[in-house]
Image (cartoon, rainbow, N blue to C red):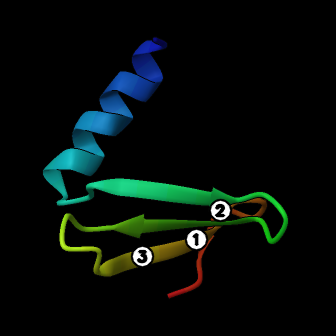
Amino acid sequence: MCPYYVGRIKTLAGAGVFRWVTDVNHNKRSYYAIDNTLLYIEDVENNKPLI
């Protein structure tokens, strides 16, 4: 695995992110906590937060 992704995964885990889902049809990535609470949505194409 690429060192960039290993560092990013450790950072996401430290922030409480349990999983993320990328919707390529709508260019969105959603991050969820272990209890399935939506934490954050970002625009993948423009790298901007949506919520």
The CA span between labels 1 and 3 is: 7 Å
Vertical position of residue 34 compared to residue 3: above or below: below
Vertical position of residue 34 compared to residue 9: above or below: below
Q: Image check: 1 left or right of 28?
A: left
Per the rendering, the mark at residue 31 is none
Can you give x and y, in whole percent of width and height, for residue 23 in the image? 70, 63
> Going by the picture, which residue comes out furthest to the front?
35
Vertical position of residue 49 compared to residue 1: above or below: below
Q: Residue 43's quadrant in the figure?
A: bottom right
Per the rendering, the mark at residue 42 is 1
> Going by the picture, which residue comes out furthest to the bottom?
51
User: Tags 2 and 1 in contact by the CB under 8 Å rule?
Assistant: yes
Q: Residues within 10 Å of mark 2 (few under 14, many from 20)?
A: few
Q: Residue at x 42, y 76 (%)?
A: 40
Q: Which amino acid type corresponds to the residue marked 1 in the rendered image?
A: Glu
The CA span between labels 2 and 1 is: 6 Å
Q: Which residue is mark 2?
A: 47
Q: Which residue is mark 3?
A: 40
The label nearer to you, 2 versus 1, is 1
User: Tags 1 and 3 in contact by the CB under 8 Å rule?
Assistant: yes
The CA span between labels 3 and 2 is: 12 Å
Q: Which amino acid type corresponds to the residue marked 3 in the rendered image?
A: Tyr
Q: Which amino acid type corresponds to the residue marked 2 in the rendered image?
A: Asn
The label nearer to you, 3 versus 2, is 3
What secondary structure is found at the residue carrying circle 1?
strand
Q: Image check: 44 left or right of 42?
A: right
Can you give x and y, in whole percent of width and height, for residue 8 in the image? 37, 37
What secondary structure is found at the residue carrying circle 3?
strand
